[in-house]
Image (cartoon, grey):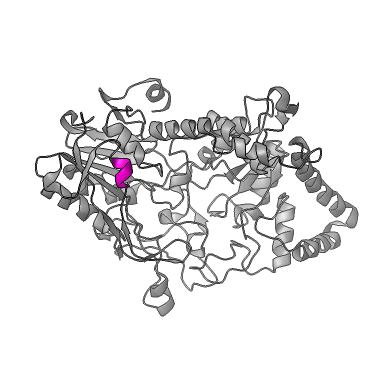
Amino acid sequence: MKRFAEIGSIEYRALGFATSLFPMVDVGTDPRWMRFCYTMGEGTKLATDMARAYCDGFQTSEGDAEICDGWGWNSVNTMVKHWPGTGACNEGGRDGHQGYGKYAVFPNGNFELHTLPFTEGAFKLEGKTKVSAALMPDYSACVGFEPDGVGSGFSRKFIQDMLREQQNYDGVICSDWGITHDEVGVYACKGKPWGMETKSVAERHYKVLMAGVDQFGGNNDRGPVLDAYHIGVEKQGEEWMQQRMRTSARRLLTNIFRTGLFENPYLDPAHTSEVVGCPEFMQEGYDAQLKSVVMLKNHAGVLPLEGKKKVYIPERYVPSYIDFWGGRIEEQHITPLSKELVERYFELVSTPQEADAAIVFIESPNSGYGFDEEAARTGKDTGYRPISLQYSDYTATHARAQSLSGGDPYEDFTNRSYRGKSVKTVNKGDMDLVIQTKKSMGEKPVIVAINVLNPPVLSEIEPYADALFLLFDVQRQTILDLMAGKAEPSALLPFQMPADMRTVEEQAEDTPHDMRCYHDADGHVYDYTYGLNWKGVIDDERVKKYK
């Protein structure tokens, strides 16, 4: 992670970027969450160490690149997010971008656990810059922990009390995008003024300023900021409000000075061309991708394949669906790998009958985001739905009968339970593709590679796979290198793989490592830190440190 950040900072600066809106260090304690895939997993210690490594690597300049105190020409201000930790996400795995996911719940009271990657990681760096230069609060209203019932960007407790005073944090705090804009419905990804829905735009800006925030994410209009200033003058006095604005100005300007932008804000295009995407960095990036691929299963040692085998790679079909932002994704017929690439490793054939082995590329299940807009609009029901991690149709018989959170100006009820409701996955065809390929291949090996955004229930897939890999949005070529034995799998699971949907429903949104894990046909348990190499189950220093 640190090396990734060092390279990233050099490329960022060569492109003119001096602040990164990362790292995202939320602990992924609910496997259903849409942003689960952007976390460092569900381990608090790992997320803490990753946060520190990221911030150190991005912010530290050394040698001739250093200007002062570790800052310099290769430094990028990191904006660690989302304070106080969105991994406890919103009930049922929903997300706070929309009103239907505005409330974070803590069934087991694990609030402090989610702050540790900030307080013990990003705020305690090993390098000379000492602390992450910037921070972003989350959208959510944290039920039971925020006394005013407001989203974190409005919370004086979370920002002024916990950050500014208890942690002595003096970096830039930037709100997440659009929190001062108007909500237009629980299903719309527009404004996110959680807990401040009935207040004016100017009042929301004032609330944010009083909480201790310095910068309004997603707002380019100075009007409401000036309005908020005048509200402050009336309530606090002009001298106090002047000092409040100057404090934020000092923080913002400090991050610009540290990175040398006042001395030289210009780029050298020749240097940019030489550095960005150079062969050395590209190779290090690809090697990192290889190291991230988890091998879950290698039944009877079918991999690596020896010699130039004949392989069959079926086309993947995905019907049209609506994405998280409300846009329609048209149906797709996907060819996972080009013929030219495959034939560097194997002979590509067009039918299972010709093949020595098959490779099936699929995605983790996509059942939507926990809400049915059409049902809510038409009054059919509340609109709340489960988020499923299995491919086949799912009915939430084990969900809570009474939700832990609820209440919205656009809803006349508070119980957001989805118990007894059903959902279908967009890509059920992925499961069918694996099953059909195995039937067609008979006793010949089928290798399944799942690109994972959320950990799927594997009981529908694993029995039909002789070898099973998890990919995390990396190049599909990695599977060819691993299958051919040009590289050895070395990655470990950064999360648990659920045994079934019942354990997903019964786990607590705020608690890591609390699911029954999937057991495969070879007797392996797909738990946190599990992974295989060619010799078998990996048991190294990483497992000892993090399991």
Please say whether residue 1 is visible from this viewpoint: no
Residue 319 position (above or below residue 355): below
Q: Residue 308: x percent and y percent?
A: 21, 33
* Residue 86 horizontal/vertical position (percent): 52, 48
Residue 149: where, in percent of width, then height? 59, 57
Of 304 and 186, nearer the camera is 304
Marks counted in the figure total: 0
Q: Residue at x 22, y 47 (%)?
A: 461
Q: What residue range appears in magenta?
A: 338-342
Relative placement, left or right, of 504 versus 84 is left
Which is nearer the eye, 26 or 240?
A: 26
**Could you tell whether 108 is left or right of 521 in the image?**
right
Most distant residue in the top direction: 541
Which residue is painted at 75% across and 42% down in the image?
A: 266
Residue lying furthest right: 239
Viewer-proximal residue among 513 and 346 = 346
